[in-house]
Image (spheres, helix red, strand yellow):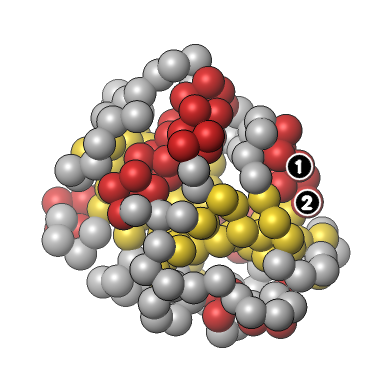
Amino acid sequence: MIHLVTAANAAAYARELDEMFQMRYRVFVEKRGWPLHSENGRERDRFDTDGANYLLVTETDGSVSAAARLLPTTGSFLLSEPLADMVEGTLPAGPDVWEVSRLVVRGDRTDTAYLGPLLLGITQFGLLRGVKSFLCNMDDEFADALRAIGLQTTRLGPPQPDPNGVPRSAVAIAFTDETVRLVKAMMGGSSGALLGDAPEV
């Protein structure tokens, strides 16, 4: 199942959110060794506020298998402040532009069993919020994977190495009717419901 978690329903997802923060710690701090703030085996930063939206993919046993954070660009977000040096020129922002960050997937991130439902949830979120573009900080391998399925991506600045020397870039991903079609095709026509008043795709 795909869940949209906001400040309005976060209390009902306390366990799942805690599992997400633990997953973020395992992936970003333990596995990748990024110098991110963490406490008690949980990674969270100053952008994990009531203004953040989260997408959670859960299995039949209720465990979280994938998650992502979505931040409005009408306020502060990763690419506007701590990662602003990754962007050359004007950074896209506005009510129809959202940043996707802290994307984590159980196991291999390219496994469509987990990544596919998360992309579907992001697509449904885009429809719900009237999104025209998503911003993301991603490595070149993941950007290539998105382009391979036909998504329209635009690099906002030159690649920069992460703490492990892996090139990462700030990328804008256009959200159009074609995006919806491509994600549906990748999922084999599947349209799992996003819990939280979002339209199915």
- Can residue 84 be seen here? The reply is yes
Q: Classify residue 112 by image quadrant.
A: top right
Tell me if residue 22 can be seen.
no
Q: Amino acid at mark 1?
A: Asp
* Near-viewer residue (125 or 154): 154
Q: Amino acid at mark 2?
A: Asp
- Figure label count: 2
Task: Residue 93: give x, y in percent of width and height.
Answer: 49, 73
On the rendered image, what quadrant is the C terminus found in?
A: top left
Residue 123: x and y in percent read: 42, 41
Is the C-beta separation of discs 1 and 2 under 8 Å? yes
Q: Relative to 181, is 197 above or below?
A: below
Q: Which residue is mark 1?
A: 144
Q: Pointer 2: residues within 10 angstroms few (<14), some, or many (20+)? A: some
Nearer-the-camera pick, 94 or 67: 94
| Residue at 81 percent of width and 65 percent of height | 159
Label 1: which secondary element: helix
The answer to whether residue 73 is above or below residue 165 is: below
Q: Which mark is residue 140?
A: 2
Residue 173 coordinates in the image, percent (x, y): 59, 52
Residue drawn at (53%, 21%), measured in percent from left and top? 185
Q: Residue at x 24, y 59 (%)?
A: 6
Q: Residue at x 82, y 68 (%)?
A: 158
Q: Is residue 94 above or below residue 166?
A: below
Farthest residue to the front: give it: 177
Q: Which mark is residue 51?
A: none
Q: Secondary structure at mark 2?
A: helix
The relative height of residue 51 versus residue 121 in the rendered view (above or below) is below
